[in-house]
Amino acid sequence: MRSSLMQNAERSTEPGSFVLQNERMLKVDLAGTGGFFYAKQGSMVAYQGDVDFNYQGSGGVAKMFKKAFTGEGMSLMKVSGSGDVFLAQDADEIFIIHLEGESVTVSGSAILAFESTLTWDINRVEGASMLSGGLFNTTFTGTGALAVTAYGTPVVLQVDVPTYVDMQAAVLWSTSLQSTVRKTAKIGAVIGRGSGEAYQLGLVGQGFVVVQASEGHPVVNQG
């Protein structure tokens, strides 16, 4: 059979590595990962081999469920066994970050997968308790791969002056930055199309922030 579709054949990878099959799909070879890694629940689109998906969590991952990402609507699954696993999330763009004894803070909704060699802690952004559901982020530390998603090609902003980012647009930022929440009136309230307030993530210090080109996926009306 001949088709341009065949140009998208599976890519070969090194054991244990996180690689992009394409800009919207991640491939993970379980060999060499220590036997398992963590991924966003429901993100698996295909796998080959003897792979197990544990949605309950155990050991260190239990804290993910204990401190549930209620504001982000996210939970994790432990992926173990042998074989290749393909992950995707709503056809969002995927980016792999290789930490080498470093730390980075990630918005909970942007986390796709990460290696078990990384340690993490879940925090609420200072001042976010006034928001419905709050704003949770996760700090990853150590050496290993982390895959994040962005809905719309992102931009990396260097922060050397106070910087404000729409909360739904912030993907990740330097742990060296101090974060706060800033409240402003929605534009709709100013021009008469609505009322209410909007919130921005405020960042100060020296570092960077990754901002996606949207405020997240449109909400589908189920009614």
Image: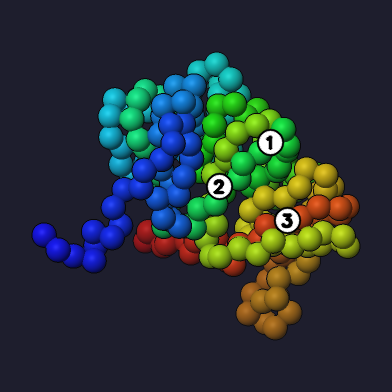
The quadrant where residue 105 appears: top right
Residue at x-position 23% and y-position 59%: 6
Amino acid found under the numbered disc labelled 2: Ile
Element under disc 2: strand
Question: Label 3 amino acid?
Answer: Val
Tell me the tag on residue 100: 1
Compared across the picture, whether 95 is left or right of 28 comes to right
Q: Residues within 10 Å of mark 2 (few under 14, many from 20)?
A: some
* Label 3 residue SS: strand
- The answer to whether any part of residue 4 appears in the image is yes
Q: Which mark is residue 223?
A: none
Q: Which residue is mark 3?
A: 209
Task: Tell me: residue 86, above or below residue 68.
Answer: below
Mark 1 or mark 3, which has the lower sequence index? 1
Measured in 3D between alpha carbons, the distance from the residue under mark 2 to the one under mark 3, in whole angstroms, is 15 Å
Residue 169 in the image, given as x and y percentages of width and height: 63, 60
Query: Label 1 amino acid?
Result: Glu
Q: Quadrant of the N terminus?
A: bottom left
Of callouts 2 and 3, which one flags the residue occurring earlier in the amino acid sequence?
2
Residue 116 drawn at (x, y percent): 55, 27
- Relative side of 149 to 206, left or right: left
Residue count near mark 3 (Cα–Cα under 10 Å), binned few <14, some 14–19, many ≥20: many
Q: As drawn, which residue projects farthest toward the left?
A: 1
| Residue behind mark 2 | 96
SS state under label 1: strand
Q: Nearer the viewer, mark 1 or mark 2?
A: 1
Residue at 43% from the left image edge and 46% from the top image edge: 26
Distance Cα–Cα, label 1 vs label 2:
13 Å
Q: Are marks 1 and 3 in contact (CB under 8 Å)?
A: no
